[in-house]
């Protein structure tokens, strides 16, 4: 049985549609997308709210989670890097995690069959 991994991509919300379309063209159909807040090298920004200067440290981002076979990871990484790289702080991160098993609740399928 081929190893299964979880790919997490955290990036700018405005890049979601372009990335999703590129991944679908590569045969990646299943993904979970969440709105998240985060802080990193962007350091947030300062805004005036009701006359007071306020520093907003957490910026809105999206997190895309993909369960896939290990053999498809390099392709996903290349697509994400090409689409998301602007050269500016805030482009995001790609995180690869091992997955011990996946079980599809409806059918009981396990492993790669459940993806």
Image (tube, rainbow, N blue to C red):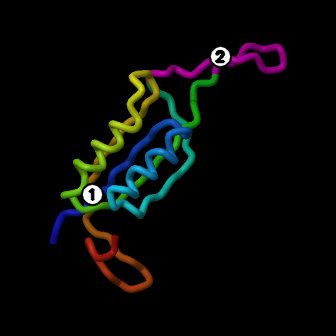
Which residue is situated farthest in the right direction here?
50
Report the span colored magenta: 41-55
Query: Is disc 1 placed on a helix, strand or loop?
Result: strand
Q: Which residue lies at the image location 44% right of the left edge and 46% below the top edge?
A: 19
Q: Nearer the viewer, residue 51 or 112?
A: 112
Which residue is situated farthest in the front direction here?
25
Q: Which residue lies at the image location 44% right of the left edge and 22% below the top edge?
A: 89
Q: Residue at label 1? A: 5
For residue 45, what is the image quadrant?
top right
Label 1: how many Cα within 10 Å (few below 14, some 14–19, many 20+): many
Q: Position of residue 115 (x, y in %)?
A: 34, 70
Q: Which residue lies at the image location 32% right of the left edge and 56% below the top edge?
A: 26
Inspect the magenta stretch and tell me whether residue 51 lies in it. Answer: yes
Please say if the residues under marks 2 and 1 sit with CB atoms less than 8 Å apart: no
Describe residue 98's horizontal placement relative to residue 21 as left or right. left
Total numbered labels: 2
Label 2: how many Cα within 10 Å (few below 14, some 14–19, many 20+): few
Q: Please, what is the dominant secondary structure of the magenta stretch?
A: strand
Q: Position of residue 12 (x, y in %)?
A: 51, 36
Q: Residue at label 2? A: 46
The vertical placement of 69 against 90, above or below, is below
The vertical placement of 46 against 64, above or below, is above
For residue 31, what is the image quadrant?
bottom left
Which residue is situated farthest in the left direction here?
1
């Amino acid at each position: 049985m081929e190893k299964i991994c979880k790919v997490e991509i955290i990036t700018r919300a405005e890049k979601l549609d372009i990335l999703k379309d590129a991944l679908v063209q590569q045969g990646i159909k299943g993904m979970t997308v969440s709105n998240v807040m985060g802080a990193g090298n962007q350091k947030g920004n300062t805004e005036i709210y009701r006359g007071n200067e306020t520093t907003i440290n957490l910026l809105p981002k999206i997190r895309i989670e993909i369960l896939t076979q290990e053999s498809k990871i390099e392709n996903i990484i290349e697509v994400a890097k090409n689409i998301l790289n602007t050269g500016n702080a805030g482009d995001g991160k790609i995180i690869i995690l091992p997955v011990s098993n996946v079980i599809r609740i409806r059918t009981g399928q396990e492993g790669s069959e459940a993806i």
